[in-house]
């Protein structure tokens, strides 16, 4: 492979060979990927060389459909040349924020405070669910803002400027922090409605504080499970209360009689 710069031969466990492409820029040795042929690896090397050493820096949005170089590496190389920082994930830096790219015209915007985290964690996408894997577990990126997994945009949280790709902290407003809790207003007064889904939504009660509504939801879920309902209701975790205070509020809060009516009318009761 001496006649093809940046290409080396490697072997799989079954003895078959493949080809690694790499390039060095500003004393940084950069892997460009593995390829089935030396020609494909050479194409990736030539594209990388042009990005890093060409007369002009290409735009991320101009990523060619026929490119041999993976898109994530394309972003990484452009960012390295323009901003002087090599980041393995597909991040492009701007003053005060950065973009994390999935496609040439699809990127998420984050505060620079999140740069270290997303430079070491790859964002994955399943349908509309965005998550990262950390120590074998999956975490939705919204959880970093205190937004629960099954929260609904517009009901439980808002993107203040209307851009649901803008994940800067000042752009996200959490409306409802807890499962089954909804903030409402009537006659100029704010209250919190707790409800639970059992073949339809049942109101547990209306409470003066968000925390009480969250505890009431937990209490209703406990009562239903103890009565034989098999649904695994997600419980709310109240981090700002001691165990004693939580139990005191739990015992004192009343819940709607409709919950008991559901229990009594259930075939399992």
Image: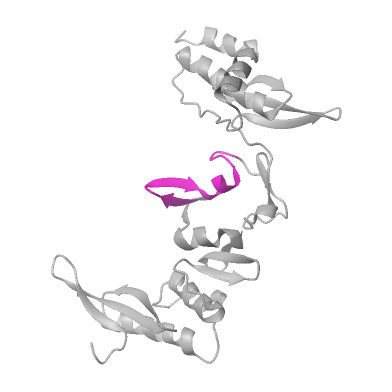
The N terminus appears in which quarter of the rendering? bottom left
Residue 56 seen in the current view: yes
Closest to the observer: 81 or 131? 81
Q: Is residue 123 left or right of residue 214?
A: left
Tell whether position 144 is magenta. yes
Picture quadrant where residue 137 is located:
top left
Residue furthest left as drawn: 15
The vertical placement of 204 against 146, above or below, is above
Closest to the observer: 84 or 57? 84
Closest to the observer: 68 or 136? 136
x, y percent for residue 135: 38, 48
Which residues are drawn in magenta? 131-151
Count of marks, rendered view: 0
Tell whether position 122 is magenta. no
The vertical placement of 131 against 248, above or below, is below
x, y percent for residue 113: 59, 59
**Image point (42%, 86%), residue name:** 49
Residue furthest right as drawn: 187
Q: Is residue 153 left or right of residue 47?
A: right
Q: Is residue 249 left or right of residue 265?
A: right
The vertical placement of 108 against 11, above or below, is above
**Image point (44%, 73%), residue name:** 73
Picture quadrant where residue 112 is located:
bottom right
x, y percent for residue 96: 65, 66
**Image point (59%, 66%), residue name:** 98
Name the colour scheme: one colour
x, y percent for residue 268: 44, 10
The vertical placement of 217 against 179, above or below, is above
């Amino acid at each position: 492979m001496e006649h093809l710069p940046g290409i080396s031969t490697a072997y799989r466990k079954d003895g078959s060979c493949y080809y690694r492409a790499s390039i060095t820029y500003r004393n940084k040795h950069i892997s460009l990927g593995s390829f089935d042929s030396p020609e494909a690896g050479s194409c990736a090397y030539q594209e990388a060389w042009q990005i890093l050493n060409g007369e002009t820096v290409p735009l991320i949005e101009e990523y060619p459909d026929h490119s041999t170089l993976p898109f994530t590496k394309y972003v990484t190389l452009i960012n390295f040349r323009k901003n002087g920082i090599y980041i393995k994930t597909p991040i492009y830096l701007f003053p005060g924020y950065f973009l994390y790219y999935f496609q040439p015209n699809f990127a998420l915007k984050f505060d620079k405070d999140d740069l270290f985290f997303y430079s070491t964690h790859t964002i994955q996408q399943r349908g509309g669910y965005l998550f990262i894997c950390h120590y074998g577990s999956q975490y939705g990126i919204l959880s970093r803002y205190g937004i629960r997994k099954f929260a609904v945009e517009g009901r439980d949280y808002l993107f203040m400027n209307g851009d649901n790709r803008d994940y800067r902290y000042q752009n996200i407003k959490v409306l409802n922090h807890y499962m089954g809790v909804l903030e409402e207003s009537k006659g100029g007064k704010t209250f919190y409605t707790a409800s639970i889904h059992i073949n339809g939504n049942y109101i547990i009660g209306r409470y003066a504080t968000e925390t009480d509504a969250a505890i009431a939801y937990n209490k209703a879920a406990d009562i239903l499970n103890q009565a034989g309902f098999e649904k695994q209701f997600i419980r709310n975790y109240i981090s700002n209360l001691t165990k004693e205070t939580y139990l005191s509020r739990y015992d004192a809060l009343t819940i709607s009689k409709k919950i008991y009516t559901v229990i009594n009318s259930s075939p399992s009761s």
